[in-house]
Image (cartoon, rainbow, N blue to C red):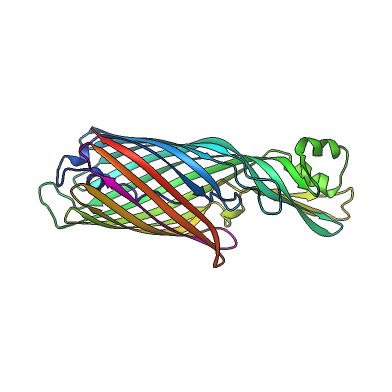
């Protein structure tokens, strides 16, 4: 759940981040095109093990009118296959994920702006290692499985911003206050691909043939998992951003977000249970399976950020704390930044972050990203 930057301040701070012309009233009106590529190691969900990835991103901004700007971006991420999960030969498979965003911003008045962003990702397949549990002789048994998962998302964000910046009256300190509401729908379908039974990995097709006409607990559990299941998670994000710009060169900002879900335990989405009856089951009992959802759900996050601009370079750094809505309780600490050279119309930059997740106070997964890009301002 790491947001790459504070939400772009739609007028003046955009000039702070990208413009080489100091104190230019027209700097915010520049159109731009940005290309970026990078990679690292990610831990995208509690279920999927850490694995390397690489990405390419293309983004553009167009000042359609004095008070209207349009933006769009597309990112393609390639997640590589992970190492075998501990205790099994199964591993998370690779996938290709497209993510796109389009946005519009309108200056309602001299100090007020509104914006709307639409984003989404079409279905992307990934083989995910997860467990299947069923009773045998009154004892619970868990085996590793490979689930074929297709995940997607779609959402929208509306934001309202007030700032004190005035082209006609310069201030030593300007303030910007923003409020935003975002909604995202996460969806997935899951289907059993294989089971790591003692001694061998058995495909779902082989299991179906072996279990035909058999009602043992394991066969019933396999049968449940072999049926395509659809899961969803609805997320509402409420956020606010406060930024102070000092002497047109230094920015101090803080972003706070709180997340609401359509269920009390969002980490349970994408996991299923089925009732076992008859056959070798002496009493009604349940089987459980599932690979979760393609998201690490946050409950709230706090992100302070500092930016400094000189004549030829800008430097930004941030820290983010996130509390995840999963059991057992997990938190994430992220440190990141961006350095941009202001070379006339060209703006080369490097960016990156490191995230450390803690589960129950113990070290969990580590993730990192490094990227390089080039922006052309027109």
Task: Pinpoint residue 202: horizontal percent, then vertical percent.
Answer: 78, 41
> Could you say which quadrant of the image residue 264 lies in?
bottom right
Task: Pinpoint residue 159: horizontal percent, then vertical percent.
Answer: 34, 47
Q: Is residue 184 above or below residue 96?
A: below
196 and 125: which one is in front?
Answer: 196
In the picture as drawn, the residue positioned furthest to the bottom comes out as 361
Q: In the rendered view, does 40 fall on the left or right side of 293? A: left
Q: Which residues are magenta?
A: 325-345
> Could you say which quadrant of the image residue 212 lies in?
top right
Q: Is residue 277 magenta?
A: no
Task: Pinpoint residue 260: horizontal percent, then vertical percent.
Answer: 49, 54
Task: Pinpoint residue 123: horizontal percent, then vertical percent.
Answer: 55, 35
Q: Is residue 330 magenta?
A: yes
Q: Is residue 244 above or below residue 146?
A: below
Q: What residue sits 20% from the left and 35% below the top?
A: 66
Q: Is residue 164 above or below residue 117?
A: below
């Amino acid at each position: 759940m790491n947001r790459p930057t504070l939400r772009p301040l739609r007028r003046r701070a955009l000039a702070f981040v990208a413009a080489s012309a100091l104190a230019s009233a027209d700097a915010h009106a520049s159109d731009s095109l940005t290309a970026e590529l990078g990679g690292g190691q990610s831990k995208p969900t509690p279920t999927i093990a850490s694995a390397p990835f690489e990405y390419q991103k293309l983004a553009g901004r167009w000042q359609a009118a004095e008070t209207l700007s349009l933006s769009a971006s597309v990112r393609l991420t390639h997640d590589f296959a992970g190492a075998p999960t501990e205790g099994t030969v199964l591993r998370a498979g690779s996938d290709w994920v497209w993510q796109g965003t389009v946005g519009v911003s309108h200056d309602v008045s001299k100090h007020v702006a509104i914006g709307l962003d639409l984003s989404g990702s079409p279905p992307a397949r990934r083989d995910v290692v997860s467990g299947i549990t069923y009773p045998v002789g009154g004892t619970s048994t868990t085996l590793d499985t490979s689930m074929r998962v297709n995940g997607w998302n779609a959402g929208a964000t509306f934001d309202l911003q007030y700032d004190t910046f005035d082209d006609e009256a310069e201030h030593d300190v300007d303030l910007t206050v923003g409020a935003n509401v975002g909604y995202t729908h996460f969806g997935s379908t899951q289907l059993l691909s294989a089971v790591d039974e003692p001694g061998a990995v058995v495909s779902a097709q082989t299991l179906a043939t072996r279990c035909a006409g058999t009602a043992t607990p394991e066969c019933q559990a396999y049968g449940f998992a072999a049926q395509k299941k659809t899961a969803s998670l609805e997320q509402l994000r409420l956020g606010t951003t406060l930024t102070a710009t000092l002497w047109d060169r230094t920015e101090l900002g803080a972003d706070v977000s709180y997340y609401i879900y359509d269920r009390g335990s969002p980490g349970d989405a994408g996991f299923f249970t089925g009732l076992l009856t008859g056959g070798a089951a002496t009493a009604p009992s349940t089987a459980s399976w599932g690979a979760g959802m393609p998201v690490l759900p946050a409950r709230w996050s706090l992100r302070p950020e500092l930016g400094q601009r000189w004549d030829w370079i800008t430097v930004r750094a941030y820290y983010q704390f996130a509390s995840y809505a999963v059991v057992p309780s997990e938190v994430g600490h992220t440190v990141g930044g961006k350095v941009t050279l202001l070379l006339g119309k060209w703006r080369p930059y490097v960016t990156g972050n490191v995230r450390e997740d803690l589960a129950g106070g113990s070290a969990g997964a580590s993730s990192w990203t490094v990227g390089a890009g080039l922006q052309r301002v027109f």
